[in-house]
Image (spheres, rainbow, N blue to C red):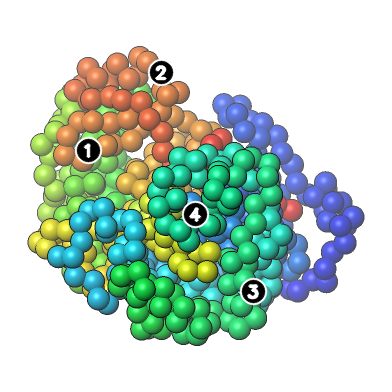
């Protein structure tokens, strides 16, 4: 992966570059200005995080360096969604070799896990909950294989924000306030997020000295200090003292897994998504089902089009619950799930006049041949990263582990307690994960880098984005701002539609038998790249604190 190191640019030079190479302008049908640039772009859920990634690009780093710097800052400024100990999935496009690879950083349960010892609550929150920390290992491996900067260099902005503080945002303050009871129940969590026994207010400088100290040690000694050194021993001791399951061996034995993505097609585009226990196969299944229909002729967000897409998402969701789990424990019929022939069989089940509440999962075998945050980066050489990372639920386990300033992800809470379920909680097992970062290629060249948080709604949200982009010719910004639906029951008819969805559309869906509510979820983040000119264009939901930084 080619990169050219540049000397540190002066502040004046950086300003001149920003003035000359970035444009931001509103576009028809969108409320948020589009950022466009030539040399590199970072999109994430927070402006400080995006700017940290941009800083790496300006200093000569590549998309991988920028992605890790961005992710590290997100752990500081968005701790309700991100953590050194989060899970996740990272797609990397290496322009030099023209290949897409993935890092499976979906965290496994501790080795001492026994499903019989859990309730639904203890699997999700508290000292028994939590899966092995994965995010830091993914960052470290990505840098070693594809990066050009050191771990210390890319962690520097995050360390600065943790040590010296950053202005408390309204969104983080609201998240702490909404979880005050949860956080105050754990002394170590209250110490970090409720300093002086109160919720930090917007604009106050918020510092996290314990997290800063851990990151400083990682920067100085490497990631092994967290997994195999003193920090690992301290974390194991903390859990032993509090009746938890984690041992030193859980941390020391953890390794990320390099993977190859699934590849599908949709109306002339090649689409790269994660396979295995992630839900990329479901995105491809949905697209395959509706590819048999002329959506453009049916009209955008008409009751007919939305009905077809909602029923499609329900079918894919039932397949998720029957087939998607850790492939080290079960065989997933991936080739069948993404088969065009299987999609035609699924399409035949849909009644265009009536919502169906009694769908069953399909049988793809004859065709055999996961609160979250997302970021995307593209550099001047064309390398890309699409990385979705998650603590599981907001604040993960809710337990700040000792003096680390870090909460573990609660992936076990997204698993089943039924021993016969494919996604049953078990020792060393990774949970089914809704995460679905995506690349889209046209004629073999990358054009779209996208992803979204949103738990159960992630792959359905990505489905709607692709349809908006391809079938209705929207720009990325328009495609992410259009009101969406959320399927709340795969076996049933309860759905939500965004508040911006016109009443007549909601009424048209009700007439077909859908139980329609109002709701919201997901924050799509997109970078589009012109394959001929290399010009980059952003697309961001006007929600959360999402921000594009570029030069």
Q: Which residue is mark 3?
A: 216
Q: Which residue, as the protein is rendered here, is positioned at the far front? A: 196
In the rendered structure, find residue 502 and report the number of the disc placed on it. 2
426 horizontally vs 133: left or right: left
Q: Residue 365 appears in which quarter of the rendering?
A: bottom left
The image shows residue 270, relative to residue 276, as above or below, that is: above
Residue at the spot 50% in from the left edge and 64% down from the top edge: 406
Residue contact at pointers 2 and 4, CB within 8 angstroms: no
- Which of labels 1 and 4 is toward the front? 4
- Closest to the camera, between mark 3 and mark 4, is 4
Query: Which quarter of the picture shows residue 150?
Result: bottom right
Q: Earlier in the sequence, mark 1 or mark 4?
A: 4
- The kind of secondary structure element at disc 4 is helix
Distance of label 1 from label 3 (alpha carbons) = 45 Å
The disc, 3 or 4, on the residue closer to the chain's N-terminal end is 4
Discs 2/1, front: 1
Q: Is residue 382 above or below residue 491?
A: below
Local crowd at mark 2 within 10 Å, few (<14), some, or many (≥20)?
Answer: few
The residue lying at 68 percent from left, 56 percent from top is 165
Q: Position of residue 87 (x, y in %)?
A: 41, 63
Residue 201 position in % (x across, y down): 62, 40
CA gap, disc 2 to disc 1?
Answer: 22 Å
């Amino acid at each position: 992966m080619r990169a050219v190191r540049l000397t540190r640019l002066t502040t004046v030079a950086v300003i001149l570059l920003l003035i000359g190479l970035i444009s931001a302008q509103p576009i028809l049908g969108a409320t948020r200005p589009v950022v466009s640039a030539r040399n590199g772009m970072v999109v994430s859920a927070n402006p400080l995080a995006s700017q940290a990634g941009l800083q790496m690009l300006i200093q000569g780093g590549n998309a991988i360096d920028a992605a890790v710097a961005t992710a590290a800052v997100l752990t500081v400024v968005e701790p309700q969604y991100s953590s050194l100990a989060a899970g996740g999935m990272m797609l990397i496009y290496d322009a030099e070799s023209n290949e897409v690879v993935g890092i499976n950083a979906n965290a496994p349960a501790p080795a001492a896990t026994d499903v019989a010892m859990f309730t639904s609550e203890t699997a999700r929150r508290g000292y028994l909950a939590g899966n092995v920390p994965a995010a830091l290992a993914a960052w470290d491996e990505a840098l070693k294989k594809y990066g050009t900067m050191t771990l210390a260099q890319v962690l520097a902005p995050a360390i600065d924000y943790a040590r010296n503080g950053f202005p408390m945002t309204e969104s983080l303050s609201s998240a702490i306030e909404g979880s005050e009871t949860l956080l105050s129940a754990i002394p170590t969590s209250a110490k970090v997020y409720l300093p002086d026994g109160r919720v930090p207010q917007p604009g106050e400088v918020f510092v996290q000295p314990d997290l800063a100290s851990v990151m400083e040690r990682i920067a100085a000694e490497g990631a092994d200090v967290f997994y195999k050194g003193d920090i690992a021993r301290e974390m194991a001791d903390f859990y032993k003292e509090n009746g938890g399951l984690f041992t030193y061996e859980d941390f020391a034995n953890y390794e990320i897994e390099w993977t190859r993505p699934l590849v599908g097609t949709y109306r002339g585009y090649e689409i790269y998504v994660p396979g295995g226990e992630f839900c990329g196969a479901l995105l491809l299944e949905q697209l395959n089902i509706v590819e048999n229909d002329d959506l453009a002729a049916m009209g955008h967000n008409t009751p007919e089009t939305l009905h077809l897409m909602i029923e499609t998402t329900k079918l894919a969701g039932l397949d998720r619950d029957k087939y998607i789990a850790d492939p080290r424990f079960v065989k997933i019929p991936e080739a069948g799930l993404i088969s065009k022939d299987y999609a035609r069989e699924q399409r035949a089940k849909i009644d265009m006049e009536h919502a169906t509440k009694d769908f069953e999962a399909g049988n793809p075998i004859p065709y055999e041949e996961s609160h979250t945050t997302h970021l995307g980066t593209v550099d001047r050489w064309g390398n890309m990263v699409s990385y979705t990372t998650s603590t599981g639920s907001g604040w993960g386990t809710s337990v700040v582990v000792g003096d680390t300033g870090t909460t573990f992800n609660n992936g076990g809470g997204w698993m089943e307690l039924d021993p016969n379920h494919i996604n049953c909680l078990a020792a060393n097992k990774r949970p089914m994960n809704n995460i679905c970062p995506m690349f889209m290629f046209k004629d073999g060249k990358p054009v779209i880098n996208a992803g979204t948080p949103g738990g159960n709604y992630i792959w359905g949200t990505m489905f709607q984005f692709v349809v908006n982009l391809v079938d209705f010719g929207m720009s990325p910004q328009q495609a992410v701002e259009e009101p969406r639906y959320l399927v709340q029951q795969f076996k049933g008819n309860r759905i939500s539609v965004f508040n911006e969805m016109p009443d007549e559309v909601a009424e048209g869906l009700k007439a077909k038998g859908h139980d329609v509510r109002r709701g919201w979820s997901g924050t799509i983040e997109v970078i589009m790249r012109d394959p001929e000119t290399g010009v980059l264009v952003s697309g961001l939901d006007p929600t959360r604190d999402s921000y594009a930084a570029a030069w």
